[in-house]
Amino acid sequence: MKHIIKGLVAASAVAAALTAGLASADGHKTGGTLKTVLGSNLRTLNSAVQSGIVTGYPGAQLFASPLRYDDSWTPQPYLAKSWEVSDDGLTVTLNLVDNAVFHDGEPITSSDVAFSVKVIKEAHPFKSMFAPVESVDTPDAHTAVLNLSQPHPGIMLAMSGQLMSIIPEHVYGDGQDFKTHPRNIEDVVGSGPFKLSEYKNGEFVILERFDDFFIEGRPYLDRIVMRIITDSSARAIAYENGELDMGAFESEPLIINRLKKVDNLTVTPNGYGAIGALDWLAINTTKGPLADKRVRQAIAYSLDKNFIQNALMQGTVNNADTGIHPDSPFYNSDVNSYDIDLDKAAALLDEAGYPVGDNGMRFSVTIDYGWPAGKQHVEYVKAALKKSAIDVEVRASADFPTWAGRMGKMDFDLSWDAVFNWGDPVIGVHRTYLTSNIARGVWSNTQGYSNARVDELLDMAGRENDPAKRAALYAEFQAIVNDEMPIYFMHTLPYHTVHNDKVMNAPVNGIWATSSPLDQVWLDE
């Protein structure tokens, strides 16, 4: 039987111009301007050709995806009113809503879905999302059939959030390069609940309600004003004095805890499960002492995660013992947590053949970091490993590209890193462990880790549509990697959403944070 799921500038001047309108029968109010923020500048507004949380925020408002997800990781209808996965997992049929149009009034058809898949496969950095899709049939204007070379359970999450933006073929199919197309940043024609009103580089993005959005009565807001404020302290002041109603992906513990003390603000880490951001210590498994699993385990036993999480990160993070985010349904918590144990670390190092030398040290390694927030972590690692007689030299990079280049070429011993799961493990987890992905650039398998059983498990999990069987495969995978320690898993990134209490239906109950549509957000004022 087939699996069928059905379901029916001043930027502040603009923000002050409108107030919320009348209440509806179900309690929400319509109208008003949401004053919100982006923490860095944009390269593109088109999330079909670019990943990242900054692109994802406006991208998910400007462009609709076929599906959306609730907080139980269950797909819900969006641009696709229903869908069907064949028994063999080789076809996914999307049945589009009948009344959807792009922002220029042209109808959204199955041909646009097929075109969007083509663009994403060619231009988006996450190649695994649609790699098994060989073709897309369009038997009628509202039916798109994705034909796969193998079952691909990750495709369902890949059709949600910012990952599968449906873009207009009549705009982007003009022969210009998809990544550099001028309509990625100006005169954007989208499919989502909001349309682009104005974008000023380095200052703001203003979105307006799209009156012909395919879900009747939505969006509830009239406008979203996204100010670009790169300084976290300036954002904090703006939250405190009411210049900002909402923001997401705040990640500095001092700022987070400061804002938690403001009476009219809610500050929460909820809603980031599909983003799946983790901090970890990457270990080059091909170099010197680090090639020995016992040495890598000794490093783990030398570090005090409790200190890192509660002193350095000030209680703003959650523990993570594997490379799958703890909010994921595939997370395996039944693994070794490597609580600090210097005696065990010493015994492992002795057993591995690295005794303490005449200089008081066993051996020397370097440790890298790629952005300023990582400095305190690497300085801690340096001090902690000294207690296990491992000499650590901190190696700062001139800029992020320098660090990324070192990582991509495996020119490092240890490095503090942050990596995103991006929803399904096929998209954001497999890349770190597959033998076939060693040294393919930053955020590939830069640890040089190779385990035939892990390769086999990930291949099977990437083809298995049964959730329980998939979970068992991923549980074994996590246990192996936790034991072999190519990475010492530390904690979630301290991403928090901040919103004023007047913001209703803030994106904190889903899994994509602001990389999801805000069509149901409204202002109680």
Image (spheres, grey):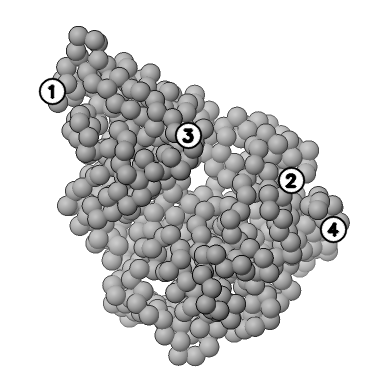
Query: In the rendered structure, which disc, 4 or 3, sits on the residue that comes first in sequence?
Result: 4
Q: Is residue 309 visible?
A: no
Residue 351 to residue 49: above or below: above
For disc 3, the marked residue is 398
> What whole-number distance in Å separates the C-alpha atoms at marks 4 and 1?
71 Å
- In the displayed structure, 299 sits above or below 462; it is above
Q: Are marks 2 and 1 in contact (CB under 8 Å)?
A: no
Residue 44 position, x and y percent, is 59, 59
Front-lying residue, 370 or 300: 370
Label 3, residues with CA under 10 Å away: few <14, some 14-19, many ≥20: few
Residue annotated with mark 2: 244
The residue closer to the viewer here, 271 or 411, is: 411
Q: Earlier in the sequence, mark 2 or mark 4?
A: 4
Q: Is residue 46 above or below residue 419?
A: below
Say which label, 1 or 3, has the lower sequence index. Answer: 1
What distance separates the C-alpha of mark 2 from that of mark 4?
A: 15 Å
Upstream in sequence: badge 3 or badge 2: 2
| Residue bearing the label numbered 1 | 353
- SS for callout 1: loop
Dot 4 or dot 1: first in sequence order is 4
130 sits left or right of 151 in the view: right
Image quarter where the N terminus lies is bottom left
SS type, badge 2: loop
Q: Residue at x 19, y 12 (%)?
A: 357
Which residue is found at the position 73% from the left and 67% from the top? 209
Residue closest to the far bottom: 140
